[in-house]
Image: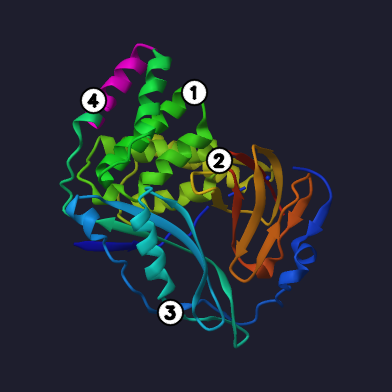
C-alpha cells in the first residue's frame, strides 16, 4: 500500500474604483517590515496518513487537498480542506496526519514568524496503475459522447446528473468522470466549471493506467480552460510540470495557447479571472499582479482570504475598490469562501 504526497501551491484574479493599500486594510494582522532576511519554513517531521482499512479492502482510492499555516513554533495550524474526492475517512486521516507535521518556522530578520501560504495534496493510491472501470461508468462514457454527437444536450445533461450522484472507486474512474463533466461544461460554455473539473483530477493522472491520446487531450483541454478563464499562473505551472520538467515536446495546440498566455501576462492591460466555489465551499488561485479588485460575485460569497508569503489579510466587503499588495508581502494566493456554485471574477491590474 503506497502513499503519495504532492505539494500544491495554488493559482489568480479582479474592477475600478478607489485605490487603497492592503497594509491599511489589514492593520489587525500587522504590517511586516520590508524584508531584509527571509527564510522559508523547512520540514522536520512528516507523517503519512493512515490508509483506512475498509477503503483499502474495497480498492477505493482518492485524494485530499488542504491549506494550512505554520506558526512561530513550527506547528501546523488553521487546517482547511479545500478539495477532495469526497471520501470522509480519507479527509479525516489527511487532517490527522497533517496536524502531526513539524517545521523549522519561517524567519524574518532572524525572528520566527507565522507562514500562511501553505498547501498540500495527499493522494491515497494503491499504486498499481491497473484500476478497473465499472460497467456503469463505461456505459455512461459511451452514451454521453453518442448523445453529444447527436446534439442531444438534454440527454447528455441527464447522464452527467446521474454521474454526479455516484462516487468513483479509484483514481482512474475519478479522472474519467471529471473529463466527462468538463466536456459537458464546454458544450454549455461554462468555462469556469470546465477548468475546475479538469484541474480537480489533473494530479491523479500520474497514478492511472491511462495513456495517449487521452492524456494529451486532457492536458491540452486543461491549459485551454486555464487560458479562457484567466488562470495564467496555473497554466504555466501545468506546462512546467508536464512538459518542461519531463523534457517532453508539447503539441502545436499547447504551444499556441501558451504563446497567447505569455502575451497577456506581459500586456499592460488588466485581465479578468473567473472561478466557481467548489463542494468544499472555497475556490483559490494565485495572483500574478500586485493590484486587484473583485469584479463580480454571483451567489453567496462571504469572505476573501489573501494568503501571502509573509502576511495574511481578510476582506468581507466586495465593491469596486482596487487593492494594492505591498511588495514585501511576497507572492500571494486569493481564497474565496462561500456557498457551493457561487461564482467570482477578479480583475488584475498592471502596477
Please give the name of the residue rendered at 23% of the width and 47% of the height, measured from the top-left corner.
208
What label does residue 294 carry, if any?
A: none
**Whole-number angstrom distance, CA of label 1 to CA of label 2:** 15 Å
For disc 4, the marked residue is 139
Badge 2: residue crowd in 10 Å (few <14, some 14–19, many ≥20): many
Q: Position of residue 159 (x, y in %)?
A: 35, 24
Asked if residue 245 is positioned above or below residue 212 in the image, the reply reads: below
**Whole-number angstrom distance, CA of label 3 to CA of label 1:** 46 Å
**Whole-number angstrom distance, CA of label 2 to CA of label 4:** 29 Å
Mark 1 or mark 2: name the one nearer the start of the chain: 1
**Whole-number angstrom distance, CA of label 1 to CA of label 4:** 22 Å
Please give the name of the residue rendered at 24% of the width and 50% of the height, measured from the top-left corner.
60
What label does residue 188 carry, if any?
A: 1
Asked if residue 68 is positioned above or below residue 170 in the image, the reply reads: below
Residue nearest the observer in this picture, 276 or 54: 54
Q: Position of residue 244 (x, y in %)?
A: 36, 54
Q: Main secondary structure of the magenta part?
A: helix
Mark 3 or mark 4: name the one nearer the start of the chain: 3
Asked if residue 192 is positioned above or below residue 119 in the image, the reply reads: above
Q: Quadrant of the C terminus?
A: bottom right
Amino acid at each position: 500500500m503506497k502513499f503519495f504526497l504532492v505539494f500544491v501551491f495554488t493559482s489568480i484574479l479582479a474592477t475600478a474604483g478607489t485605490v487603497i493599500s492592503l497594509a491599511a486594510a489589514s492593520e489587525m494582522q500587522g504590517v511586516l517590515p520590508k524584508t531584509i532576511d527571509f527564510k522559508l519554513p523547512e520540514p522536520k517531521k512528516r507523517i503519512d496518513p493512515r490508509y483506512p482499512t475498509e477503503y483499502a479492502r474495497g480498492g477505493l482510492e482518492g485524494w485530499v487537498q488542504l491549506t494550512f499555516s505554520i506558526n512561530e513554533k513550527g506547528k501546523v495550524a488553521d487546517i482547511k480542506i479545500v478539495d477532495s474526492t469526497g471520501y470522509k475517512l480519507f479527509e479525516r486521516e489527511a487532517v490527522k496526519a497533517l496536524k502531526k507535521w513539524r517545521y523549522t518556522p519561517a524567519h524574518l530578520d532572524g525572528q520566527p514568524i507565522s507562514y500562511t501560504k501553505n498547501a498540500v495534496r495527499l493522494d491515497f493510491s494503491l499504486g498499481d496503475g491497473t484500476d478497473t472501470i465499472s460497467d456503469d461508468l463505461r456505459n455512461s462514457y459511451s452514451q454521453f459522447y453518442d448523445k453529444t454527437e447527436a446534439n442531444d444536450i438534454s440527454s447528455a445533461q441527464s447522464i452527467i446528473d446521474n454521474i454526479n450522484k455516484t462516487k468513483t472507486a479509484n483514481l482512474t474512474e475519478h479522472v474519467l468522470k471529471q473529463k466527462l463533466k468538463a466536456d459537458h461544461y464546454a458544450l454549455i460554455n461554462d468555462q469556469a466549471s470546465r477548468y475546475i473539473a479538469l484541474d480537480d483530477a489533473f494530479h491523479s493522472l500520474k497514478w492511472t493506467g491511462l495513456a495517449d491520446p487521452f492524456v494529451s487531450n486532457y492536458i491540452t483541454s486543461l491549459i485551454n480552460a486555464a487560458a479562457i478563464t484567466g488562470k495564467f499562473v496555473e497554466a504555466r505551472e501545468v506546462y512546467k510540470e508536464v512538459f518542461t520538467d519531463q523534457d517532453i515536446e508539447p503539441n502545436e495546440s499547447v504551444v499556441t495557447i501558451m504563446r497567447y498566455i505569455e502575451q497577456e501576462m506581459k500586456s499592460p492591460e488588466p485581465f479578468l479571472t473567473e472561478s466557481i466555489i467548489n463542494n468544499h465551499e472555497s475556490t483559490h488561485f494565485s495572483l500574478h499582479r500586485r493590484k486587484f479588485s473583485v469584479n463580480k460575485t454571483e451567489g453567496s460569497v462571504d469572505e476573501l482570504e489573501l494568503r501571502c508569503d509573509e502576511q495574511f489579510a481578510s476582506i468581507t466587503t466586495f465593491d469596486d475598490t482596487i487593492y494594492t499588495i505591498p511588495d514585501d508581502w511576497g507572492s500571494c494566493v486569493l481564497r474565496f469562501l462561500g456557498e457551493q456554485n457561487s461564482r467570482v471574477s477578479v480583475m488584475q491590474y498592471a502596477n
